[in-house]
Amino acid sequence: MRRTGVDKVRENLRLQQVYNVFLRYGWDFAFSRWGILGDIRHRLQVWVWGLPADYEAPSTPVKMRLMIEELGPTYVKVGQIVSSQASVIPVEWATELEKLQSDVPPFASELVRVRIIEELGAPPEELFATFDPEPFAAASTAQVHRATLHDGTEVAVKVQRPNINHEMRADIGIMQNAARVISRRSDLVRSIDLVGMLEQFGTGVLDELDYRGEAYNGIRLAKNLEMLPGVHVAAIFGNLSTSKVLTQEFIHGVKVSDVEAIEQAGLDREELARNALRALIKQLPIDGFFHADPHPGNLLVNLDTGILTFIDLGMVGELEVQQRLHLIQLIVAAQQGSVDGIARVLRGMSTPFLDHVDDKAYYRDFKRRVGRYMVGGAPASFGEIANEGFDILRAHGLRLDPNLTLAVKALVQTESVASALSTGKDLTSEGVPMLEELAVHVVTPEKILTEAKKQAMAGASELIKRLPDLSLASVKWLDQYQKGRFEVTIDTSELAKEVDKLSLLGREVVVAIMLVGMLIGSAIASYGIAALEMHGFIWDLMGTIAPLGFAVSLIITFLIVLRLVWRWMRRSAPGAD
């Protein structure tokens, strides 16, 4: 992420705000850990604020969530991402961070009008038949207004908050600077490439502020799910959408978790549960492009039609073919109740974040802890297996790729939705039959032939690009054959680097020997002249130069040692000077 001088000024101003919040909560965390002082402070709080006598202070994860919400949208986003990495954080922290909310008071309707004019070139009263100036939802980065198109279609208009881009850029710059400082002093932080992770995070967060990406996600997901009955994705109106304004279909419905309303409407809960599971199975192992946060608030049920609609496509995930195969193996192993199979698949999906991983201990621990969920052949909940599996991975220094973690979490969320709608619907029993059903419809001979043609055309195109190079290479080899010799080119660039290092070391050794010689020689000369009481112009001159040479040599030696210690503390690479 490129930063200008203005960005750095904003970072400095924002840094003071962040520092104040950290300082306030930091003192609170410190007092909570200081035993008697913490108890005295707690009693004073109860007395001053008139709290109940049995009042218990919030836990550390709760305080952390409140601090993150106060810090603003960038930090809320970090907390939401961290909560999705259930394989590397304790369960109580993941549970609390999942509650992060970014709800804030709405901004003025006049600013909304200005933003729409800037982005769409006309005021809302001209673009829409009706436009409600009061938002029905407001978050830290945007707010949403109800409107009606001139053809009577109801839409939701998402408008970005003013200056939110600058604020988030400043926050990301602060995080990256802090990461660079910490990385210089910590091997562990450097080994996990925190700087690179924050660079990737910053790019992703700023990309999400460009609503054209969310529009693309919605259109792509709608196309992927169009073959499934009872499932819908909110339509996007591209002519009324820009990077800062998004217009999409307004969805009438209730949360999929509102079982009472669904029952009163006379809808088939079993069918809704099947549709929810089938939609996620289609997205994850079949398409590899999925809604990364399918919680009940993002799945709405139309009580008139029973159609299940996916909304809020700001966060999506994408899986490569190999990752999709891993996910299929995990679902099959869970369906078969194979503890060994689940352990192997999760181990194959994960990467270590510690220097050494004891695989024998991992498999032994996995059998002992996950096996209890499968006693007597009873079907186990995929959510229980996944949560326990994440704990074991973390305990043994392993973690999943972020996209795979999002994928497993999406499966767990969907299974919990399906289980709430119908106690008989769970991923371990329903997932494999649905996989087979979808694979039959998706992997058809026609599609295989079409894909093969695409691959063949791509290969032929690449071959054509290389043909001139191949012909030139053939002619050169033929010329060399006719001359009776062949030329071989050896790349010595890496060898040259090592030679340079040896040359540098040699120069350092020569300098060190010269300094030692000067120190010893000048010391001996000073002592000898003084001890023998030699006089005369030459001896007097040498008596003056010898101590001076000793002092100069000592100062140079001290500076070199200081420089070496500084480089060692900063962990600079050898030969960096």
Image (cartoon, rainbow, N blue to C red):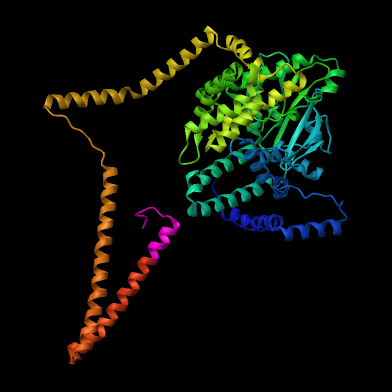
- Residue farthest along the left direction in this orientation: 484
The residue positioned 73% from the left and 45% from the top of the image is 62
Q: Is residue 433 magenta?
A: no
Q: In this image, 563 relative to 112: left or right? A: left
The spot of residue 572 in percent (x, y) is: 41, 55
* Quadrant where the image shows the C terminus: bottom left
User: Closest to the observer: 548 or 487?
Assistant: 548
Please report the residue visible at 51 percent of the width from the left and 25 percent of the height from the top. 344
Residue 237 placement, left or right of 282: right
In this orientation, which residue lies closer to the viewer: 391 or 350?
391
Q: Which region of the structure is painted magenta?
A: 562-577
How far across and how far down the image is residue 472, in percent?
26, 26
How many numbered marks does the figure carry?
0
In reply to whether residue 566 is colored magenta, the answer given is yes
Q: Is residue 179 visible?
A: yes
Q: Quadrant of the N terminus?
A: top right
Residue 517 vs 412, above or below: the answer is: below
